[in-house]
Image (tube, rainbow, N blue to C red):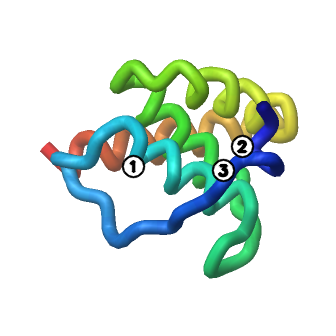
Amino acid sequence: MPFSEMEIQPGGLLGAEANADEFYQAGLACAAGVGSDIDLISAHKWFNLAASKGHDEAKLQRQEMADMLSTDEVKVALSAARDWLSLAN
């Protein structure tokens, strides 16, 4: 199901203890522009983090974001996910 059809429940700040669904919800919020402008790079980052915790739908959404981004933008998103992991741990 594309992100545009998903129910979005934006949450608070996500810490290292966040679960896969919280990361996924953050990705949906960024992809749909909930509370701010649409940010597909951040959406990819959050979907990537959710996928790394085993969220299957996030894997599909991450690919959908990648299809809409340039190669350089995907690199930025992947770097942001790595940075987030290093700061959260």
The amino acid on which the numbered mark 1 sits, given as a three-letter code, is Glu
Alpha-carbon span between mark 3 and mark 2: 6 Å
Alpha-carbon span between mark 1 and mark 3: 17 Å
Quarter of the rendering occupied by the N terminus: top right
The amino acid on which the numbered mark 3 sits, given as a three-letter code, is Ile
Q: On the image, numbered disc 3 is attached to which residue?
A: 41
Q: Which tag, 2 or 1, sits closer to the chain's start?
A: 1
Q: On the image, numbered disc 1 is attached to which residue?
A: 22
Viewer-proximal residue, 32 or 85?
32
Q: Height in image: 61 above or below 39?
A: above
Q: Which tag, 1 or 3, sits closer to the chain's start?
A: 1
Residue at 72% across / 25% down in the picture?
Answer: 63
Residue at 46% across / 25% down in the picture?
Answer: 55
The reply, left or right, for residue 65 in relation to residue 29 is: right
Alpha-carbon span between mark 2 and mark 1: 23 Å
Q: Which tag, 3 or 2, sits closer to the chain's start?
A: 3
Q: On the image, numbered disc 2 is attached to which residue?
A: 73
